[in-house]
Amino acid sequence: MSFASNDSATKQSAGIAITAEEIAEQGITASEDVARYALYLGDDALMLGQRLSHWISRAPELEEDIALGNIALDLVGHARFFLTYAGTAWGKTEDDLAYFRDEEEFRSCRLVEQENGDFGQTIARQLIFSYYQHELYSKLVESQDETLAAIAAKALKEVQYHQDHAAQWLLRLGIGTEESHRRIQEGLYYMWPYIDDLFHDDDVTAALPGIAVQPSSLRENFDRRIAEIISEATLELPQVDQAWGGDRSGEFSEARGHILAEMQVLARQFPGATW
Amino acid sequence: MNAPQADHLKAVSDAALGEDEQAAQNYFDQLISEDSRVEPRDWMPEGYRKTLTRQVSQHAHSEIIGMQPEANWITRAPSLKRKAILMAKVQDEAGHGLYLYSAAETLGTPRDVLNQQLLDGKAKYSSIFNYPARTWADIGAIGWLVDGAAICNQVPLCRASYGPYGRAMVRICKEESFHQRQGWEILYELSHGTPEQKQMAQDAVNRFYGPALQMFGPPDEDSPNSKQSMAWNIKRFSNDELRQRFVDMMVPQAEALGLTLPDPDLKWNEERGHYDYGKLDWNEFKSVISGHGPCNVQRMQRRRAAHSEGAWVREAAAEYARKMEAHNAELIGA
């Protein structure tokens, strides 16, 4: 059996060639509207990558140090693409946007900012987010914006693995032992109130028909697919009200400030420095 | 059977066993003298097996504990590119740990037993990882000096007589050379940055240089096991030979970085064709390796916590596998 080189999950196969550096060098400039949308996508990936990276050297098994680290690395990679592209609208680099925006300027959803908690809580967050991201990128590959489509094509292959990783762990924890069943169920309850945030259409997405994916259009598939895997794992679909207040224009979790304080501390000690 | 008959039979079987063992030993000796590879199913002397199990598992433990000082900076890396590179690097270390535990397992000791030896404090790991990574420049110094020393040590191990170990080292060395390059790059950027950044780089090199030289182990006259390891073709060069090679390699690299090495006695010796270097503080080495370095307690505490907090996850995975197996057996039976 042979594989074509573009079967690799770490190589992008559709659209234009892609690394963050190449996006920066291509001389393409995102419009203001596209840049605002790219921030949504980039900030979600960055926050979750930052959160997950904390597991490296702390995971239940060496194999999970590698797996969670790899997912975190993919997400930071996605963030670099989207932030680099967004930055072209304002003459800013990925690092200007990651390190020198304040809390209220980020556009991440509350779900990705939630604490890691135990492994069950982390897997619950991974499950929700990777299922959402899978739906999102599956549609974004058809975006009329070629750069967004190319980023999505690369990211989609990786997110397929993220989704599989989360689903496999959901099954192991749901079906494994009484304790693991209890913990993953608690994790799902903890994360569930922040699901609606992912599916709000707003002025940013509405301004980009054919370019942005309208989040509400992803809901039906998401609901169906996540209910299936949760049921297969012998777990209960949480029936809880959604947490009040969660659009991307300024509502954010308490955790965001802590995440940024840690992430930005060194870069802000040396503004203008290169690394 | 009367007693003399039984004694006679025993004597015969002992002689047979003795002959087999002698033949096996001869075959092993021949492999070593031909500089060939010993493979897991080959007979090997107990001492060879023990020495390798200890060395390979200590190496694996070092990779795993070594993830901690670097993971310490992943969340604070000063650019997204540096963050991504560092994450990939620490992931590599976990991968190296896995190859090495697998190589050690081929010698007959399971990974969970080796892991337990680490958690119980019965197994050692490289003492360099008991030093703190206080600043971002320390990540550069760890890559350049610590991974650099590791490469000097490990390249000859690619030819180690034990096959699985040598083959694991080939792959590890390839990745380590990337690691060293990223460390070099970090220090290069810092030493060509602002005065504060350059100072940060110099300070890191000042702190890590001595401990990196000690990574090659005690001076030859205090390293009694080296001789046997060399006779077995596990080790190819003595501790002092490797240390010298490392010093000779690092001096021009430090010059290219625009940084100094913290050794007033460092001087080119025309006659020897090597750099002379100053005495190392072996009391510090002994103290750190026996548990009294700046971070020994924290490193072990974090490893134990990850293991105990993850116990329920491992149990769930094992129980799930058992249930699925039973379920499949039932399906096949029905």
Image (cartoon, rainbow, N blue to C red):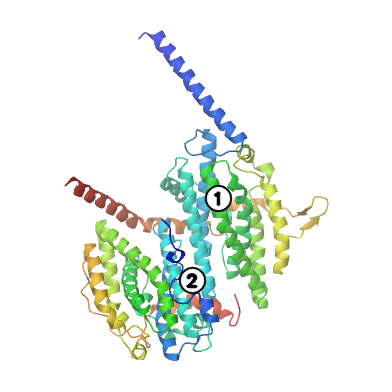
Query: Where is the N terminus of chain B found, in terms of image quarters?
Result: top left
**What amino acid does circle 2 point to?**
Thr
Taking the image as shown, residue B81 lies to the left or right of residue A220, namely: right
Q: Nearer the viewer, residue B248 or A161?
A: A161
Label annotation for residue B169: 1
Q: Residue at x 33, y 64 (%)?
A: A164
| Left or right side of A99 for A34 | left
Chain of the residue displaying label 2: B
Q: How many marks?
A: 2
Residue A29, percent across and down?
Answer: 50, 87
| Dot 1: chain letter | B
Q: Is residue B253 left or right of residue A67?
A: right
Q: Which element is circle 2 on? A: helix
Q: Is B78 placed left or right of A251 in the picture?
A: right
Q: Is residue B219 above or below residue A63?
A: above
The reply to whether the C-beta atoms of the residues labelled 1 and 2 are less than 8 Å apart is: no
User: Which of the two residues, A145 or A92, is positioned nearer the viewer here?
Assistant: A145
User: Of tags 1 and 2, which is closer to the observer?
Assistant: 1
Residue B98 marker: none
From the top left corner, tell me how far across and down residue A37 is, in percent. Answer: 40, 85
Rendered location of residue B91, percent (x, y):
48, 61
Say what amino acid the circle numbered 1 marks: Met
> Residue A204: x and y, percent?
37, 89
Q: Is residue B113 above or below residue B296?
A: above
Q: Secondary structure at mark 1?
A: helix
Q: Quadrant of residue B138?
A: bottom right
Residue at position x 60%, y 77% in the image: A274
Density class for disc 2 (Cα within 10 Å; few <14, some 14-19, many ≥20) is many
List the residue tagged with mark 2.
Answer: B75
Residue A133 visible to the viewer = yes
